[in-house]
Image: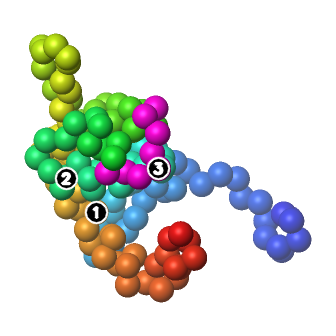
Amino acid sequence: MTGGAGRKARGPVPRELSCMISLDGRDYCIDPVGGLAEALGKKWTLPLIGVLGNREVNRFGDLLRSLEGIGSKALADRLKDLQTLGLVSRHVFAEVPSRVEYRLTSRGASFRRALVPLLSWAATDATLAPSSASRR
């Protein structure tokens, strides 16, 4: 028995079952998005994807100004994470002073579009909508 809940300890759920979502007769495994799920769980990742998709080309300073409150290191780290996942491309121009531009890849733009239904759902669910106190 575990923790007084009256249930027998059964051991860990097999990995192939613990990552499954069954919907409309199909099974989907969340595990293939492991790196993506980890990156998305980090602060600033979703707002950054949103801002990157609002313009065709983004410079570091523009992103820093657009994401009020983010620090340079956090921005650089999130951009690097998104580059590793193939969601963001980075282009360095051979100029003095150097110029670097960031943009969503086609995969990143597709992912950004896929977020819209989730964000729409969250905005209509009163338990998920941010309170006015948390927006200050």
User: What span is colored magenta in the figure?
Assistant: 66-73
Q: Residues within 10 Å of mark 1 (few under 14, many from 20)?
A: some
Left or right: 75, with 59 as reference point: right
> In the rendered structure, does residue 110 fall within the stretch colored magenta?
no
Tell me if residue 16 can be seen.
Answer: no
**What is the basis of the colouring in this image?**
rainbow
Residue 18 is situated, as x and y percent measured from the top left of the image, at 51, 56
* 134, above or below 55, in the image: below
* 80, above or below 115, in the image: above
Label 2 and label 3: CA atoms lie apart by 19 Å
Give the labeled residue for mark 3: 69
Q: Residues within 10 Å of mark 2 (few under 14, many from 20)?
A: some
At 33% from the left edge and 70% from the top edge, which residue is drawn? 118
At 37% from the left edge and 51% from the top edge, which residue is drawn? 67
Q: Nearer the viewer, mark 1 or mark 3?
A: 3
Q: Residue furthest right?
A: 4
